[in-house]
Amino acid sequence: MSIQSEDVLKIAHLARLGIEPEQVESYASDLSNIMVLVEQMNQVDTSDIEPMAHPLDQSQRLRADVVLETNQRDVLQENAPAIEDGLFLVPRVID
Amino acid sequence: MQWETVIGLEIHAQLATKSKIFSSASTAYGAEPNTQACAVDLGLPGTLPVLNEQAVRFAVKFGLAIGAHIAPFSVFARKNYFYPDLPKGYQTSQFDKPIVGLGQLDIEVDGDTKTIGVTRAHLEEDAGKSLHEDYHGMTGIDLNRAGTPLLEIVSEPDMRSAAEAVAYVKKLHTLVQYLGICDGNMQEGSFRCDVNVSVRPVGQDEFGTRAEIKNLNSFRFIEKAIAHEVERQIDVIESGAKVVQETRLYDANKDETRSMRSKEEANDYRYFPCPDLLPVAITSALLDEMRDSLPELPAAKKQRFKQQYGLNGYDSEVLTTQRAMADYYEDAVNFSDGEAKLVANWVMGELSAALNQHNIEIVSSPVSAERLGGLVKRIADQTISGKIAKQVLELMWSSEHSADELIEREGLKQISDTGELEKMIDQLMADNIDQVEQFRAGKTKMIGFFVGQLMKQTQGKANPQELNKLLQSKLKG
């Protein structure tokens, strides 16, 4: 499977990555090479192997349901470009 | 052409945990904006999620209650999309390995029972809230809700009418509250519903193209939105066009659905396993513990109420829809010495009316089950009439006294003493010879006059049955 220029542009858009037009071709070829590697790996018979969800062979540790956080709004909003009435302000989004 | 409606539902139940699913920030509703959004909820670099044990236990409890397979290992995945109320750029959810697998739920519509399949239920985090009011042309973001644990419950496309869909939603709504895993508050968004609707010609096996309707926060809206959407889709098809797969928003004011966004692009979520979270293991010890912790479920309770208390289907249904009401009812029956039917009438009638009027939940009822049971006991043994009992209930509402104390204090005890009543009737007849004669001339309705007068004299305390009996025989002469 090879990656075309349109695929690169679509993926870049979905990931909100800015890509220069002259870079599109080289990304397409790099990504295609990765797909070739994946194809190669696909040829190994893994039918007897249980799929792995995580490289660590452990299960998730759980946390007791206790509230420990206190209100840090002032500190956390120090870096925000725009705030008002305790809200973060962002460019208008309408669905 | 005859059309068949096909409905599947996705329900988001907010789990009743104290803290968020991946952080130790509070989930309490109604706080000042962003005062309950910590660094994890804000998706700041360097933070890591740690899973809330209670959220896992609640999901397992739900799975057991619908007879579902609980996955020994389930996996969290990232659902990627960009929206300002989702600061990480992905929602941590579950995809191909959800915690709860296939289960089922029975619903009743018009006396028929139908089994609805529950495809799956998975854990995920809620997003924040966007406020589109005018902030100088900008949008305000409140992330207090971000990271609140949700259980998304997905049904099979098994429902064939709006009535079935509503019955299913109500059943689930009751169930999650019974289990104590969700407060069920639809106004506050603790229990939200998305509906997938399609139509197909009767007899056709393949499903039609579906539309998803979002933003349904009441049972009535669910019913109306489905009715509207079914009509719209039939119109589209019959006019020769095709239904487009899309998300639509229900507008309650206009009672219509409108297109929100086309799903093809929006749907490219590029799920992948979340590297920050390990698989969640459910041990058999936890399964046993959760199984033992299951309360009596609504369907079983309804059945027991019919048998144990001799109630009809309707009364049993009403009394068991809320666990708190069922508990109250059973306590009150005990304190009334087993007056099951009479207590049912009072809980569903006078008490519920008063609670509704004051907008009070039954758990906070000013009249406890013990005091209501005590009141009903006095109706049953004819110490007071039902009419006087309403007065006593009013007095109880604003005091701490028992029915017996109030009956004594206010002198409300019913007069059943035949001698005393007879004396009063004789006097009344002597004073109203005209009316007696009218009665004897065939105007039997005149008895109402005598009942009224005597009730007035006794301030409603005359035993009505006794009074009627005595009046009938004396008036007839």
Image (spheres, coloured by chain):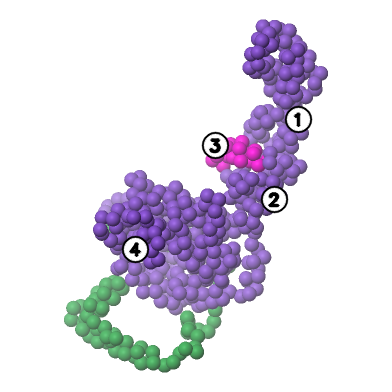
Q: Earlier in the sequence, mark 2 or mark 1?
A: 2
- The answer to the question of whether label 3 and label 4 lie on touching residues, with beta carbons closer than 8 A, is no
Give the amino acid at mark 3: Gln
Q: CA distance from mark 3 to mark 4?
A: 45 Å
Q: Nearer the viewer, mark 3 or mark 1?
A: 1
> What residue is drawn where x is 76% and y is 30%?
B383
Tag 3 subunit = B
The quadrant the C terminus of chain B occupies is top right
> What residue is drawn where x is 50% and y is 85%?
A50
Along the viewing direction, whichever of B44 and B295 lies nearer the viewer: B295
Q: Nearer the viewer, mark 2 or mark 1?
A: 2
Residue identifier under label 4: B209
Q: Secondary structure at mark 2?
A: helix
User: Residue B383, labelled with which disc?
Assistant: 1
* Residue bounds of the magenta highlight: B343-360
Does residue A39 show up?
A: yes
Give the amino acid at mark 4: Thr
Local crowd size for mark 2, using a 10 Å CA cut-off: few (<14), some (14–19), many (≥20): few
Tag 1 subunit = B
Q: Earlier in the sequence, mark 2 or mark 4?
A: 4
> Is B62 contained in the magenta span?
no
Residue identifier under label 2: B307
Q: CA distance from mark 2 to mark 1?
A: 29 Å
Residue identifier under label 3: B357
Tag 4 subunit = B
